[in-house]
Amino acid sequence: MVRKHVIVSGRVQGVFFRDTCRQNAVAQGVTGWVRNLPGGDVEAVFEGPEDRVTRMVDWAHQGPPASAVTEVEVRDEEPERLSGFEVLPTPRA
């Protein structure tokens, strides 16, 4: 079990990034969450088997077809044993 915390930059809001991310994570059996950030980035956490989490991080570098990802920051974190994958609200600035 691994956990990756990612910040995705570029044209990543308004292009169905969060919903496509959720769909892919559920299909991979990865838990976690995704949300828009006030500055225009997308933040996500992926937990699960290393190979599946790696697939999600690789996907984040591409995003959905309408996106234009320019940068992905990835941090390793201690797994929290999350259940499910959800789209969280944007935090207040």
Image (spheres, rainbow, N blue to C red):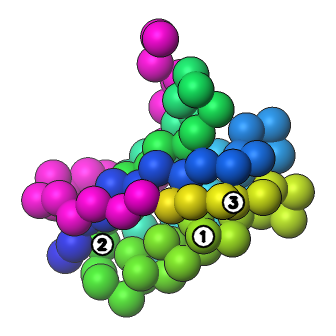
Instruction: For marks 3 and 2, give the CA distance.
Output: 23 Å
Identify the secondary structure beneath mark 1.
Answer: helix
| 3 and 1 marks in contact (CB < 8 Å) | yes
Quadrant in which residue 47 is drawn: bottom left
In the depicted view, which residue is nearer to us: 26 or 69?
A: 69
Q: Is residue 38 magenta?
A: no
Extent of the magenta region: 73-93
In the depicted view, which residue is nearer to us: 17 or 39?
A: 39
Q: Position of residue 21 (x, y in %)?
A: 62, 58
- Point out the tag, 3 or 2, that comes first from the N-terminus: 2
Return the residue at label 3. Answer: 69
Residue count near mark 3 (Cα–Cα under 10 Å), binned few <14, some 14–19, many ≥20: some
Instruction: Nearest to the eye among marks 1 and 2: give it.
Output: 1
Return the residue at label 1. Answer: 61
Q: Give the residue at x 19% y 76%.
A: 1
Judge from the rendering whether residue 62 lies leftward or rightward of residue 22; answer left or right. right
Identify the secondary structure beneath mark 2.
Answer: strand
In the depicted view, which residue is nearer to us: 48 or 36?
A: 36
